[in-house]
Amino acid sequence: EDKVVQSPLSLVVHEGDTVTLNCSYEVTNFRSLLWYKQEKKAPTFLFMLTSSGIEKKSGRLSSILDKKELSSILNITATQTGDSAIYLCALQGGSEKLVFGKGTKLTVNP
Amino acid sequence: NAGVTQTPKFQVLKTGQSMTLQCAQDMNHEYMSWYRQDPGMGLRLIHYSVGAGITDQGEVPNGYNVSRSTTEDFPLRLLSAAPSQTSVYFCASRSGAPGETQYFGPGTRLLVL
């Protein structure tokens, strides 16, 4: 069965710090790995990764996939209080289902 | 486009009551899913559908029924609510196109007493 494990589960940093969130997975037939940000309400899409070694970037956020290590990282540089959220990693394997990890709760203190 | 809509936003039920959570999308998406989110558990898939008339079970289907009579609507039914079904429920949809992401509705917060 497809599985996603995120670490750490919780992280507290100060504004300006750089953070790295991890997502590891087990999958029968990999199709894509997605990152979402969830604040108070519904998750919002950040990145979709399908190819190993190609960095996706949006402002201070970036992400990369390593298919050999069955993992992905999400980096946030120069963190701001508005980055405080739960970051979710999701995997799409052979079926049409998305399997989510438990999320990393990031708290950025001023 | 309204995107993915869910009703109600909040509901309180007594144990044993039944209700239907509504989900609709106006993007002509083939795939629709229902998730529940509990503290520290991430999003867990309840049921999903790959098109009108086709549904399948996810990770936690017990206690829930779904149907997909139209492309737009994907209601989730609780036949006999239990306190363990207290959760936040999210509906999501996406097209079948490669590289297309999944869009989430705003969620329904359900409390079962």
Image (tube, coloured by chain):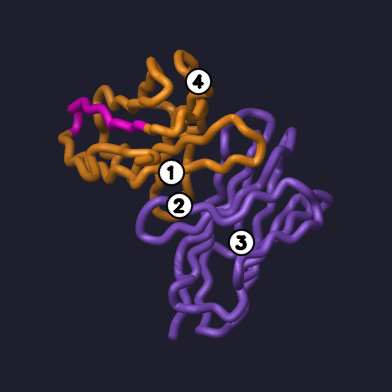
Visual hue assigned to chain B:
orange
Query: Hey, which quadrant is residue B4 in on the image?
Result: top left
Q: Using the numbered discs, state the Cα–Cα distance from disc 4 to disc 2 in whole angstroms.
A: 23 Å
Query: Circle 3 is placed at which residue position?
Result: A7
Residue A101, placed above or below residue B45: below
Three-letter amino acid code at the position of disc 3: Ser
| Contact between labelled residues 2 and 1, with CB atoms less than 8 Å apart | yes
Position of A63 with respect to B18 (left or right) is right
Tell which circle, 3 or 2, labels the residue nearer the N-terminal end: 3
Residue A84 image point, x, y percent: 45, 70
Query: Circle 2 is placed at which residue position?
Result: A43
Q: Secondary structure at mark 1?
A: strand
Query: Circle 1 is placed at which residue position?
Result: B104
Query: Circle 4 is placed at which residue position?
Result: B51
Three-letter amino acid code at the position of disc 2: Pro
Residue at image location 41% in from the left, 61% down from the top? A39
